[in-house]
Amino acid sequence: MTPLRFRVFLLSPADCSGTRARRLQSRDAVHELARRLRGPHGAELGEVFSFVSSLYFRGKLAYARAFARPPKGSTGIHVITPCDGLKPPETTVRVRDLARFGRVEVDPDEARYSRPLLRDLRALDRPWAEAEVVLLGSVATAKYVDLLAPVLGRRLLFPGDFVGRGDMSRGGLMLRSVEERRELAYVPLLGAARRGPRAARLGPLAPKQVV
C-alpha cells in the first residue's frame, strides 16, 4: 500500500472513573490542575488526561505532537472521549466534564459513546481522504476498532510494536521514539494480528553525545 501524504492521530481516552480522575474532582484536592479544572477557565483535555492516565497518555500525546502531518486546515490530533466524540487535546474541559466522562462506559454498545464518535468520524472522513489515521490505543479489544474500522477502512493504522505490550510499555516506547526522533512503523489494522506474545522490555536509552 502506497503511504498517503498526511498523517493524523486518534488517541484513546484516559480512564475517567479511576482513582486519579476522582482525585481531580475532589473538592479537597490541592493539586494545581484540580484547582484550574474547578475554576472559571478550566484546563486542557490533553493535560487532564495526561494526569489521569500518567505515562501512557503522556506518551501518546507527545508522540502525536511530534509526528502528526495533518492536511491543510485540519487538526492532526484527536482525542477519543467517552461521550463527546473526537476533541483536539487543546479543548477546554471542567470538572463537570470529567464527571460526565466517568459515567459513560467506553463500549461500542453504549450509544452515549458510539453515536458522538461515529458522528465525528463521518464528518472528518472526507477531510481525511488523503490521510493515514493512526490509532494510539488498544487494538486487542473491540471498544475502538469496531467503530473506527468500518468508517476508515485501510486508512486506519496502528504501531506494530504495540502488539504484546501493556499500557505503560507503550507509553515508554512512544516517549523514547520522541526522544530519538524515530517514528514507529505502522501497519493497517484490518487483517493485522492484534494479539501476540509479551514484548521484550525496553532497554536503556543510549547516552546522548556531547558536542
Image (cartoon, rainbow, N blue to C red):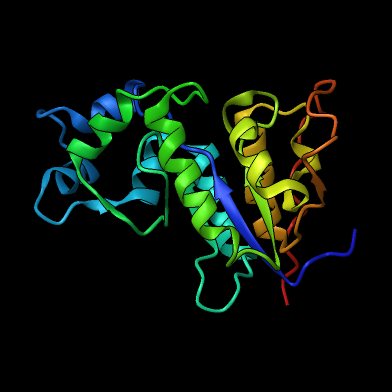
Return the x and y of residue 8 as percentages of the image width and height: 61, 60
Nearest the camera: 184 or 121? 121
Residue 104 position (above or below residue 92): above
Is 179 left, or right, of 78 in this rendering?
right
Residue for point 51% across, 70% down: 74
Nearest the camera: 37 or 176? 37
Residue for point 45% across, 47% down: 119
Give the number of callouts: 0
Is 206 left, or right, of 51 in this rendering?
right
Q: Residue furthest right?
A: 1
- When asked about the image quadrant of residue 173, the answer is top right
Q: Is residue 190 visible?
A: yes
Residue for point 55% across, 62% down: 65
Nearest the camera: 101 or 154? 154
Split into 4 quadrants, where in the image is the N terminus?
A: bottom right
Return the x and y of residue 108 as percentages of the image width and height: 52, 26
Split into 4 quadrants, where in the image is the C terminus?
A: bottom right
Return the x and y of residue 165 as percentages of the image width and height: 72, 29
Is 91 left, or right, of 146 in this rendering?
left
Return the x and y of residue 164 as percentages of the image width and height: 78, 26
Q: Is residue 63 visible?
A: no
Residue 95 position (above or below residue 180): above
Is 7 left, or right, of 58 in this rendering?
right
